[in-house]
Amino acid sequence: MCIENTPIHLGSCSWQRRDVVWQQAPNAYDVSEGSVHIWRFFLDESYALAQGGASDLLTSEEYQRWHGMASARRKLEYLTGRVMLRRLMALYQNIPAQGQPHQSIHIRDHKTDAPEPPPPLCASLSHSGAVLLIALARQPVGIDVEKPRTAAHYPHIARKMFPPTWAQALMRLSHAPQRQAILFARYWTAVESLYRLEGHGLLRSFVKETATDRFQENKNWGCHFHAGNSHIAALTASHPCALSCYQANAAFLAALP
């Protein structure tokens, strides 16, 4: 599977391919301004940590959504993603997972010369199949991961959801289903990651509005990268940033708070 170098564009944002290396856990858990840490979890290895009272880490809204899911596997995937996110954020903030605030607000005391505290930790997560990605940064970010699949319904989704130029590009690849699937995954992850960064309302309406001229002043930055042998991911951020990518192995999972 190969992600082409040709960038894709939506509104004022563009996504280019980034080559990443998945490293072992760092020695210190801190992300500086201008950087994004992306963590990759394999869900089958992480399910065990989402058992036994882990639902206590969910917000009331997340709990209601989780409780109402009909699929047992979907419930486990949702719970695992949120639990890994809370424990990872607790590790970076050096606080207990149960005690972390769901939203951090920093207020500077202008009566002193004390240095301004760092921006709050921002996070975004996405999972597809066995892969879970979590992005942490000191700026707003959105992340999405998908496994490319050839499908007969691509033309319908493209005409319904994507800008005309995207739909036309997909149709030109109807003779090359593998390339079409990869391009569709690039488009979809770009849209989802941008929506998670700054979206509101229905996804379809957001895409159409973002493609109009009145959104040209919203200058974001994005990239595509391989999240595994069979997955493509997109990251969108409020401004360009450096990426550090880490693999959550068994030793790291066992040490999570």
Image: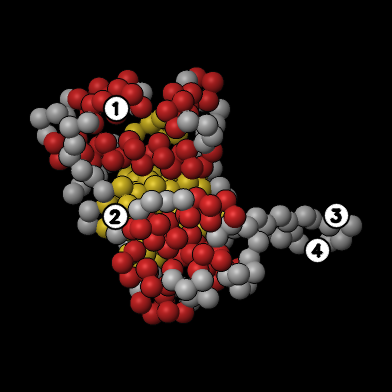
Residue type, label 2:
Gly
Q: CA distance from mark 1 to mark 2?
A: 22 Å
Name above or below for residue 72 compared with residue 7.
below
The mark closer to the camera, 1 or 2, is: 2
Q: Secondary structure at mark 2?
A: loop
Choose the circle earlier in sequence order: 1 or 2.
2
Residue type, label 1:
Ala
Q: CA distance from mark 3 to mark 4?
A: 8 Å
Q: Position of residue 250 (x, y in %)?
A: 35, 77
Q: Position of residue 221 (x, y in %)?
A: 46, 41
Q: Residue at x 44, y 32 (%)?
A: 203
Name above or below for residue 34 compared with residue 218.
below
Q: Are marks 1 and 4 in contact (CB under 8 Å)?
A: no
Q: Are marks 2 and 4 in contact (CB under 8 Å)?
A: no
Asked whether residue 225 is in view, the answer is no
Q: Residue at x 79, y 55 (%)?
A: 108
The residue that disc 1 covers is 158
The residue that disc 2 covers is 129
The mark closer to the camera, 2 or 4, is: 2
Q: Are marks 1 and 3 in contact (CB under 8 Å)?
A: no
Q: Nearer the viewer, residue 77 or 219?
A: 77
Q: Which mark is residue 114?
A: 4
Q: Secondary structure at mark 4?
A: loop
Residue type, label 3:
His
Q: As drawn, is 181 to the left or to the right of 7?
A: left
Choose the circle earlier in sequence order: 1 or 4.
4
The mark closer to the camera, 1 or 4, is: 1
Q: CA distance from mark 2 to mark 3?
A: 48 Å
Residue type, label 4:
Ala
